[in-house]
Amino acid sequence: MNKDWHVADIIAAIRKQGTSMAAISRSVGLSLSSSTLANVLTRPRPKGECLIADALSIHPAEIWPNRHYDEAGGLIDRKIKMRKAYRSKVTIYFLD
């Protein structure tokens, strides 16, 4: 299984898209501060993972494979761990 992206690589990818963690939080109209969203860099947070992955136009499993695949290599549906009202606002990019 691939390793999770390094925190610096995630931040660099966000900056290459011309945005920031704070801008991602503001863009979805949520009352998340940049420090709250930054928690996703070190802790599993499905909503934050989806926000960052959406900003990069990739599936969260590409950034955090250890959080999204079980030991047998099957993809875990982490979207079900988010509140129902928020699930419909998140774009999920499917892996080929």
Image (spheres, rainbow, N blue to C red):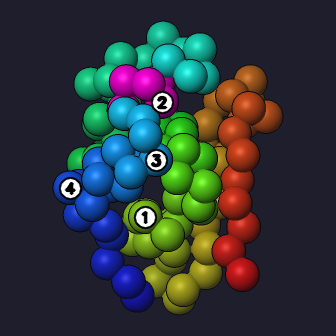
Q: Given the image, on which type of amino acid does mark 3 rest?
A: Gln
Please, which residue is most extreme toward the top here? 31
Q: Main secondary structure of the magenta part?
A: helix
Which structural element holds mark 2?
Answer: helix
Contact between marks 1 and 4 (CB within 8 A): the answer is: no
Q: What residue is at 61 percent from the left and 73 percent from the top?
A: 75
Compute the Cα span from label 3 to label 2. Answer: 11 Å
Mark 3 vs mark 2: in front: 3
Neighbour tally class for label 1: few under 14, some 14-19, many 20 plus, Cα within 10 Å: many
Part of the protein shown in magenta:
21-25
Mark in the foreground, 4 or 3: 3
Q: Between residue 13 and residue 33, name the one nearer to us.
A: 13
Q: Residue 17 has which mark?
A: 3
Rendered image quadrant of residue 5: bottom left
Question: Residues at badges 1 and 3 in contact (C-beta under 8 Å)?
Answer: no
Q: Secondary structure at mark 3?
A: loop
Q: Which residue, given by chain and number where applicable, does mark 1 sit on?
A: 63
Amino acid found under the numbered disc labelled 2: Ile
Q: Which numbered disc, 1 or 2, marks the residue that appears first in the sequence?
A: 2
Sequence-first disc among 1 and 4: 4
List the residue tagged with mark 2: 24
Q: Which quarter of the image is occupied by the N terminus? A: bottom left
Instruction: Indicate the position of residue 71 as horizontal and vertical percent values.
Output: 46, 83
